Image (cartoon, grey):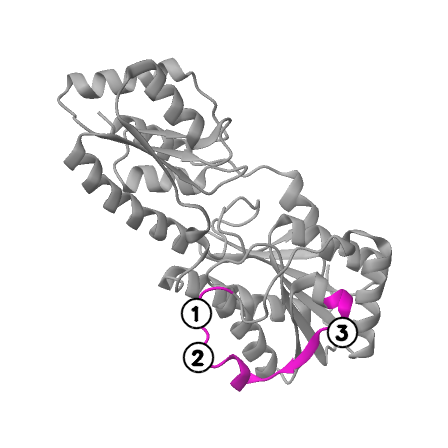
């Protein structure tokens, strides 16, 4: 049960790795708050900036013309200081000095840990928005930035396939995903990959060699193999194994941080806008210590602790689809 509260000023920050759509979320928070007569304070450089007191007022015009921009206008950083009670106490004091009644945190599970402890130790209402390209947070179908990251990786895969076919090579392409294979799986299916390696499902390299052998027997002269960075050994390990065991000309491409950048696609802009609006309305309704997500088209409110204690698996149906379509 939650009780509606009177909130006059909220703060918003982005934390952890940047994700396309964060600006759209900031814009939604500022404009929804303004619509309800609430002032907004922007915190620069995430929890590090909050600890240092790097805050400023934001109005509707301050967030004009940012919905199409990648990155985050508020900047982001990873803060070791915030992991200490003293660091969080300093941040809470800065919020009190600015007369802030509540905080919106846009980030991943590490950011939600920081928000959770702030609320627990200092009683400041906090709402989280899932901003991470990995799509690994429990309680939401998709996270802000995921759609764009997949499209960016897919564009690279399409280009590399042209080269792979021209030179009759195997390309191993490593995409982001330290603990989750959502990006890798979507890219593998959409890019027509012959095999995909996910952190959720370690497999024998002998199975990969059989896939390559079968592909060649069916007349395939080139192959695309997608590997999530969190798979044991990563893309380098897979590429080395292929070269060692088959002697086939194999090239590794690590897409890396290119997947974080670029203008957010429409799906990320819409998701971020809806979640940003939902965050402000949740605070007005008296909710706190939760993440606002979207499941089945509707908004969901998930306790912070569940976002890191409960596991979000990849789609097993899509995983089977990738296998079936790789022949």
Assess whether residue 8 is covered by the magenta stretch: no
Q: Which residue is mark 2?
A: 65
Instruction: Answer whether residue 67 is magenta in the image.
Output: yes
Q: Which residues are magenta?
A: 50-71
What x and y, as percent, mark residue 75? Answer: 59, 67
What is the quadrant of residue 196 in the picture? top left
Give the SS element for disc 2: loop
* Residue density around tag 3, few if under 14, some if 14–19, many if 20 or more, within 10 Å: some
Is residue 313 shown above or below 45?
Answer: above
Nearer to the camera, 283 or 193? 193
Front-most of residues 229 and 295: 229
Q: Disc 1 versus disc 3: distance between alpha carbons?
A: 29 Å
Considering the numbered disc 3 on the image, is that residue within a helix, a strand or a loop?
loop
State the separation of the CA atoms marked 1 and 2: 8 Å
Residue of label 1: 69
Element on which disc 1 rests: loop
From the top left corner, tell me how far across and down residue 212 is, in percent: 26, 20
* Residue at x-position 39% and y-position 64%: 263
219 over 13 or under it: above or below: above
Q: Which mark is residue 101?
A: 3
Q: Could you tell me which residue is drawn at 25 percent across and 36 percent down? A: 192
Give the mark nearest the N terminus, 2 or 3: 2
Q: Position of residue 171 (x, y in %)?
A: 29, 33
Q: Are marks 1 and 2 in contact (CB under 8 Å)?
A: yes
How many other residues sit within 10 Å of disc 2, few (<14), some (14-19) or many (≥20)? few
Labelled disc at residue 16:
none
Q: Nearer the viewer, residue 5 or 179?
A: 179
């Amino acid at each position: 049960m939650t009780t509606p509260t009177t909130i006059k000023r909220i703060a918003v920050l982005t934390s952890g790795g940047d994700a396309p759509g964060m600006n759209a979320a900031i814009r939604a928070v500022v404009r929804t708050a303004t619509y309800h007569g609430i002032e907004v304070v922007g915190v620069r450089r995430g929890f590090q900036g909050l600890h240092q007191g790097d805050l400023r007022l934001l109005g509707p015009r301050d967030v004009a013309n940012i919905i199409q921009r990648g990155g985050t206008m508020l900047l982001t950083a990873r803060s070791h200081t915030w992991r200490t009670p003293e660091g969080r106490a300093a941040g809470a004091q800065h919020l009190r000095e600015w007369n802030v009644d509540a905080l919106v945190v846009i980030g991943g599970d590490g950011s939600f840990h920081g928000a959770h402890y702030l609320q627990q130790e200092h009683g400041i209402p906090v709402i989280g928005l899932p901003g991470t390209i990995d799509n690994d947070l429990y309680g939401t179908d998709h996270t802000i930035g995921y759609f764009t990251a997949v499209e960016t990786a897919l564009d690279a895969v399409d280009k590399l396939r042209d080269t792979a076919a021209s030179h009759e090579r195997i390309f191993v392409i490593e995409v982001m995903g330290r603990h989750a294979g959502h990006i890798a799986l979507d890219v593998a299916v959409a890019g027509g990959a012959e095999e995909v390696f996910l952190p959720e499902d370690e497999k024998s390299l002998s199975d990969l060699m059989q896939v390559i052998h079968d592909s060649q027997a069916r007349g395939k002269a080139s192959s695309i193999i997608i590997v999530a960075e969190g798979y044991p050994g990563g893309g380098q390990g897979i590429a080395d194994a292929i070269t060692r065991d088959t002697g086939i000309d194999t090239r590794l491409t690590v897409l890396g941080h290119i997947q974080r950048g670029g203008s957010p696609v429409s799906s990320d802009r819409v998701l971020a806008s809806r979640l940003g609006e939902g965050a402000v309305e949740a605070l007005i309704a008296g909710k706190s210590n939760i993440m606002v997500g979207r499941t089945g088209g509707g908004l969901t409110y998930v306790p912070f602790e569940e976002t890191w204690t409960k596991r979000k698996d990849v789609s097993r149906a899509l995983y089977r689809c990738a296998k079936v379509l790789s022949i």
